[in-house]
Image (cartoon, grey):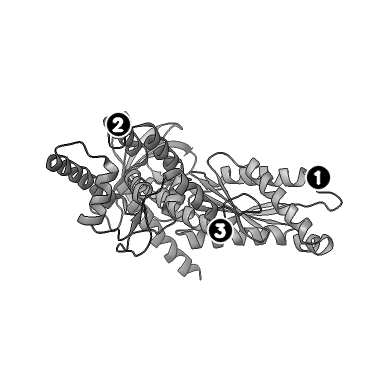
């Protein structure tokens, strides 16, 4: 069912929602569930609950986007789904017969919620095939810039929700314009098409490759730290350099940036990756450059926070942080900690009531300094504490940058 005109919801993504959702891992799982079980039946509900456990409330957002082309925020989507099931039950009681969920869906959003004005019926696979063309670059077969924008927003939201890194790789074919000028646009298009094939082959299954524009391309690497993204970029670079392009040898330059260490939103992440790409070009091309010149996915901020450390067989000890990131922290304390020790640290975080608790494993211990210290890698941090820490570090980093400026 698709809406052909009008929009009553400010939270709706628009007509592209179904195609966008259908090309995500969650979207493909939902499509398989819809096609293999009775919609709304017991097996369907069990499958949906399993996806909700894995992906959170985004499962409801994607499900409604697939079924009725409307886009809701996760919490509202869960509420709408519950209201839809209740509406179907009322219809069954009124009519004295089973009601297909799709019938209840149309009735609910037409007459109860009034989110649809002029819907039309179409087989889902036909709708998916038709709309998929709007998100593919016809020359290279990769996703296009429109899909890139939608998917980046989706993945950044998911990374922020679960505390996962998100890496972006921007690539540019070296010396493509002179090649195009010498051999003509037809030969240039053949190069772009072959480049798209090589790029797709170099990516992992979880990566999304897209034609960013002209001879520029992008790889979105979900749940991937900067070091992992660097490996993906290098694999692509080697594949391009090793390919037989004929008399003119072609190479590619790439720039890598990672959320949240290098950026806090999509626009900033793109700019950071582009700056790294520019540096790769300036330093001689045919290379991969990382934004900031480091492999850290999370930015470390030098800040002193007071806290209390709890470790097995030890009394609580006060600690003071030296630097902090969402992935780890360094601190001073009055006790030596063997590497590998699991500790809980309660940090007094400004702006939080009661502070936050970080569980971590000691990865470095300094026993020779006048004041003992250690570094831990975070192994557990609640979603709420992660949100508070991310907000604090973002503000602290801005103040630090302003101070240096």
User: How far across and down, in percent of the image, does residue 311 sit?
Assistant: 33, 34
User: How far across and down, in percent of the image, does residue 166 sit?
Assistant: 49, 49
The image quarter in which residue 85 lies? top left
Of the numbered discs in the image, which one, if any, rests on residue 136?
none
Q: Secondary structure at mark 3?
A: helix
* Viewer-proximal residue among 274 and 201: 201
User: How far across and down, in percent of the image, does residue 120 sit?
Assistant: 36, 54
Mark positioned earlier in the residue sequence (2 or 1): 2
CA–CA distance between discs 2 and 1?
A: 51 Å
Q: Which residue is mark 1?
A: 244
Residue 209 appears in the rendering: yes
Mark positioned earlier in the residue sequence (2 or 3): 2
The image quarter in which residue 42 lies? top left
Of the numbered discs in the image, which one, if any, rests on residue 46?
2
| Residue at position x 84%, y 53% in the image | 248
| Residue at position x 28%, y 58% in the image | 115
């Amino acid at each position: 069912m698709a809406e052909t005109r009008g929009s009553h919801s400010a939270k709706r993504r628009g007509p592209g929602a179904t195609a966008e959702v259908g090309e995500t891992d969650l979207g493909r799982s939902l499509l398989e569930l819809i096609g293999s079980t009775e919609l709304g039946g017991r097996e369907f509900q069990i499958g949906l609950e399993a996806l909700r456990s894995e992906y959170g409330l985004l499962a409801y957002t994607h499900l409604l986007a697939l079924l009725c082309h409307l886009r809701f925020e996760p919490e509202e989507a869960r509420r709408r789904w519950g209201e839809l099931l209740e509406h179907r039950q009322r219809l069954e009681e009124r009519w004295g017969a089973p009601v297909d969920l799709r019938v209840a869906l149309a009735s609910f959003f037409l007459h109860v919620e009034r989110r649809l004005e002029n819907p039309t019926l179409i087989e889902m696979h036909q709708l998916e095939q038709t709309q998929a063309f709007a998100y593919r670059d016809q020359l290279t077969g990769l996703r296009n810039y429109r899909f890139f924008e939608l998917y980046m927003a989706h993945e950044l939201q998911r990374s922020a929700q679960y505390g996962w890194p998100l890496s972006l790789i921007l690539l540019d074919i070296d010396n493509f314009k002179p090649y195009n000028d010498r051999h003509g646009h037809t030969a240039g298009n053949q190069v772009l098409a072959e480049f798209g094939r090589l790029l797709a082959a170099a990516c992992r299954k979880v990566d999304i490759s897209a034609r960013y524009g002209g001879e520029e391309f992008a790889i979105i690497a979900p749940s991937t730290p900067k070091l992992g993204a660097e490996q993906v970029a290098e694999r692509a670079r080697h594949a391009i350099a090793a390919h037989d392009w004929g008399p003119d040898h072609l190479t590619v330059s790439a720039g890598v940036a990672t959320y949240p260490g290098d950026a806090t939103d999509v626009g900033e992440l793109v700019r950071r990756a582009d700056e790294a790409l520019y540096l790769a070009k300036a330093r001689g091309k045919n290379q991969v450059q990382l934004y900031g010149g480091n492999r850290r996915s999370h930015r470390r901020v030098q800040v002193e926070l007071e806290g209390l450390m709890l470790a097995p067989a030890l009394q609580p000890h006060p600690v003071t942080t030296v630097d902090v990131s969402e992935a780890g922290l360094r601190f001073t304390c009055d006790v030596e900690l063997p590497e590998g020790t699991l500790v809980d640290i309660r940090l007094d975080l400004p702006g939080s009531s009661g502070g936050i608790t970080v569980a971590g494993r000691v990865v470095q211990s300094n026993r020779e300094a006048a004041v003992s210290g250690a570094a831990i890698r975070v192994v557990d941090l609640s979603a709420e504490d992660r949100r508070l820490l991310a907000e604090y570090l973002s503000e602290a980093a801005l103040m630090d940058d302003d101070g240096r400026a």
